Image: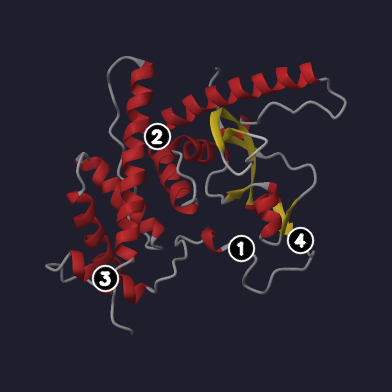
Amino acid sequence: MPEITPALIRPPKSPGRGATPEQRAAARKIRRRWLDDLADYATAQLTTPEGWSAFLWAAAMHPERPSGTNLALLAVQAPQQVTKTYRQWQADGRQVRKDEHGVLIYTSVIKTTDDDETTGTLRGFGCGVVFGYDQTDPADDSEPDEGQSEPPWRTPRIPHPRRPEELAAAAAVFASGSDRTGDDAVRDGLAVLAGAAPGLTEGEAAAAAHLAALTLGVLPATAPPLPTPETGDQDADRTELREAAARVLDTGRAIAAQFAAVSLPPF
């Protein structure tokens, strides 16, 4: 695949309504090959400061997405954007604008039976389309309220249900020796939890604490870099990067949930 820049990333076009089944099948194969190549590129970007930071932001903005590969794809195709499917935006009261081009991610292909359409077996992965917030408008054509023209995730902080003072108080449970307050106390507590997580390198633990801070709505410092594998084998390097990113993703989300679940007296 030739060198890619974010401005040039555009999925292959879908066939028109009059396409034959053979043309549609051929188009699906082309889109899948394109997505596979882009996934390799997106994984390589995890070794850059910009790419790794975008990945962690994508992970914090999409807590429902478990796939690190899909998060890497979102980081290069729609950085700093919350993305959802067409119908998900409609359910949220927003409408994707006409002629907008979505971005591709992997989706599960499930085979169901005639007797039970609620369950099935995984057959593989196909290509799905999601759209960014900036590609949508309010569904009722009404103007946003004053001060609400930008989505909340445009600000450095991602909103979290627990108030900042509650999070700071929770930090004392995990970092009892710290005398810092506010966001600094939260960062200390997250660092303690991440450092105690098994199977992580020091750099991965720092990145997990960074992700947890973003998820909790705390603005962390610059994202610590992900260690770059140097096996000399591109396939092995990509596998190692994806495994490291998965460890950071799982640990960061787990310690954020652990932190947010601390029982505190009412304020």
Task: Decide: few, some or many residues near mark 1? Use Cα within 10 Å; few <14, some 14-19, many ≥20.
Answer: few
Task: Decide: few, some or many residues near mark 4? Use Cα within 10 Å; few <14, some 14-19, many ≥20.
Answer: some
In the image: residue 148, left or right of residue 214? right
| Image quadrant occupied by the C terminus | bottom left
Q: Amino acid at mark 2?
A: Leu
Q: Nearer the viewer, mark 2 or mark 4?
A: 4
Q: Which residue is mark 3?
A: 170
Q: How are the residues colored?
A: secondary structure
The numbered dot on residue 46 is 2
- The residues bearing labels 4 and 1 have C-alpha atoms spaced at a distance of 16 Å
In the image: residue 265, left or right of residue 198? right
Q: Is residue 37 above or below residue 159?
A: above
Helix, strand or loop at label 4? It is loop
Q: Amino acid at mark 3?
A: Ala
Q: Quadrant of residue 45?
A: top left
- Compare residues 252 and 223 and report the one nearer the observer: 252
Whichever of callouts 2 and 3 sits on the residue coming sooner in the sequence is 2
Query: Where does the image place residue 215, in percent across and percent down from the top left?
Result: 40, 57
Whichever of callouts 4 and 3 sits on the residue coming sooner in the sequence is 4
Residue, x 62% and y 69% (percent of image)? 148
The numbered dot on residue 150 is 1
